[in-house]
Amino acid sequence: MSGKDVRQLIKKLEAQGFDVTPTKNNHWLVKKNGTRVTTLPGTPSDSRSLKNCIAALKRHGYTP
């Protein structure tokens, strides 16, 4: 996974009503209805990190 994958995911999340804001440490905070859902890595170094974030997003209504 790369930073490009993260940017594409952010666009999809915003289209589905999630609020995505950058943090100070090159991460992205994802909220739904004011509630924190997960934090996305800016540049995922672990192959499972983005997949784990997507799993958390699915539990809060994200449809890939």
Image: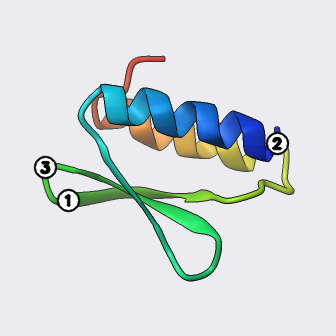
Could you tell me the amino acid type at mark 1? Thr
Do residues under tags 1 and 3 come within 8 Å of each other at their CB atoms? Answer: yes
* 57 versus 64 height, above or below: below
SS for callout 1: strand
Q: Residue at x 61, y 44 (%)?
A: 52
- Nearer to the camera, 43 or 60: 43
Could you tell me the amino acid type at mark 3? Asn
List the residue tagged with mark 1.
35
* 18 versus 12 height, above or below: below
In this picture, residue 20 sits left or right of residue 7: left
Image location of residue 7, percent across then percent down:
62, 40
Among numbered discs 2 and 3, the one appearing first in the sequence: 2
Could you tell me the amino acid type at mark 2? Ser
SS for callout 3: loop
Quarter in which the N terminus is drawn: top right
Q: CA distance from mark 1 to mark 2?
A: 26 Å
Image location of residue 12, percent across then percent down:
45, 27
The crowd level at tag 2 (other Cα within 10 Å; few <14, some 14-19, many 20+) is: some
* 12 versus 18 height, above or below: above
- Nearer to the camera, 31 or 51: 31
List the residue tagged with mark 2.
2
In this picture, residue 34 sits left or right of residue 60: left
Q: How many marks?
A: 3
Disc number placed over residue 33 in the picture, else none: 3
- Nearer to the camera, 52 or 23: 23
Image location of residue 58, percent across then percent down:
40, 30
Q: CA distance from mark 2 to mark 3?
A: 28 Å
